[in-house]
Image: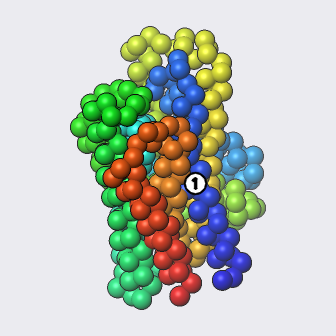
């Protein structure tokens, strides 16, 4: 395994792990409701951080973007906008059905679509050389995807079983806000739309990065510029919707009244943005298969991170029997799936 491949694997795995565990600041909040922490954290993650890096480290970024086709910019924002809607739904699902189950269902849908599509409809730049779905590498990735789906299905079943035990009073747990069935519908929709995160980068990165580098930007900030452009689409639902809720509920004053939770929201925004920067870099380091293998690795680690967070924060406290056995098997399958996908890149 060469150094570039190893670095790509490490970066994408780290991206998924950070994203999977990123909601931990939310567990410490008592006064902020969804609209408060979502407004602050998403403004930081989707607007302030990517544009600050782009403006500071990419010479003449606006002039560079003027040379990029309008279609590329619209495509990036459309994909990111879909992911933005998915994030609104996912954040709401955290308090309806729990972090573990939310990530399980969301990733089972997003993983399959996000891994397979770039091998059928080739992405831009280095990803245009991705092997076909029916090639040897494509077959290995499909096997890894099937194992991954097995893992997330088991994780979902385990989460559902855990919720049934809590509902029946067999084990304790924090009350969920809202109906479980509605939360389930919301997370399925979130899974379908979540692939926009990866697609926003893979299908628009090449012309934007080239335009930035032609004006002297280094590789990493040029990649961040892709996110600065694309994440504006994600910011529309993720920032404006919470702002509308605070206006409707007349609760803007809550932001200034709780500085600690304001800080936690900013911290969540930082942890939320970091995986995007790492995902883009990791995909590029992985080369032609980066869009598929990188996405699969990130999704697998995202689920593992979500399960780890669930264990640490007590979602699984007192839960035994079939649900606990299922979650242990699911974790093993997820690790095996990521190993298979990594092997496909090495073939």
Residue 241: percent from left, percent from top: 41, 29
**Chosen colour scheme:** rainbow
Q: Nearer the viewer, residue 193 or 103?
A: 103
Q: Is residue 268 left or right of residue 316?
A: right
Residue 37: percent from left, percent from top: 53, 27
Residue under the image location 59 percent in, 63 percent down: 12
Residue under the image location 59 percent in, 74 percent down: 286
As displayed, is residue 261 above or below residue 125? above
Q: Quadrant of residue 256?
A: top right
As displayed, is residue 171 above or below residue 197? above
Q: Quadrant of residue 121?
A: bottom left
Residue occupied by mark 1:
17
Q: Nearer the viewer, residue 209 or 108?
A: 108
The answer to whether residue 107 shows anywhere in this view is no
Residue under the image location 59 percent in, 34 percent down: 25
Which image quarter is the N terminus in? bottom right
């Amino acid at each position: 395994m060469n150094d570039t491949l190893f670095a790509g694997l490490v970066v994408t795995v780290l991206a998924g792990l950070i994203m999977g565990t990123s909601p931990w600041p939310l567990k410490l909040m008592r006064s902020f409701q969804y609209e408060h922490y979502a407004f602050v954290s998403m403004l930081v993650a989707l607007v302030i951080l990517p544009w600050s890096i782009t403006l500071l480290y990419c010479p003449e970024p606006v002039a560079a973007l003027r040379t990029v086709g309008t279609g590329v910019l619209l495509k990036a924002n459309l994909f990111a906008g879909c992911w933005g809607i998915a994030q609104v739904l996912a954040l709401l699902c955290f308090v309806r059905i729990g972090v573990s189950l939310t990530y399980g269902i969301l990733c089972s849908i997003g993983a399959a679509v996000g891994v397979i599509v770039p091998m059928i409809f080739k992405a831009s730049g280095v990803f245009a050389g991705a092997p076909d779905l029916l090639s040897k590498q494509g077959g290995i990735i499909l096997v890894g995807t099937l194992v991954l789906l097995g893992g997330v299905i088991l994780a979902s079943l385990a989460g559902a079983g855990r919720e049934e035990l809590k509902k029946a009073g067999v084990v304790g747990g924090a009350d969920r806000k809202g109906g479980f069935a509605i939360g389930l519908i919301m997370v399925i929709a979130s899974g379908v739309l979540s692939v926009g995160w990866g697609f926003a980068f893979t299908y628009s990165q090449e012309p934007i990065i080239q335009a930035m580098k032609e004006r002297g930007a280094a590789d990493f900030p040029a990649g961040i510029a892709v996110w600065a452009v694309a994440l504006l689409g994600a910011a529309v639902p993720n920032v404006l919707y919470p702002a509308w809720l605070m206006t409707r509920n007349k609760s803007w004053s809550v932001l200034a009244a709780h500085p600690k939770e304001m800080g936690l929201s900013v911290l969540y925004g930082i942890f939320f943005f970091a995986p995007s920067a790492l995902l883009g870099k990791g995909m590029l380091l992985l080369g032609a298969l980066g869009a598929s293998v990188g996405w699969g690795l990130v999704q697998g680690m995202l689920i593992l991170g979500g399960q780890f967070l669930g264990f640490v924060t007590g979602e699984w406290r007192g839960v035994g029997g079939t649900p606990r056995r299922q979650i242990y098997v699911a974790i093993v399958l997820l690790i095996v799936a990521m190993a298979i996908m990594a092997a496909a890149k090495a073939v």
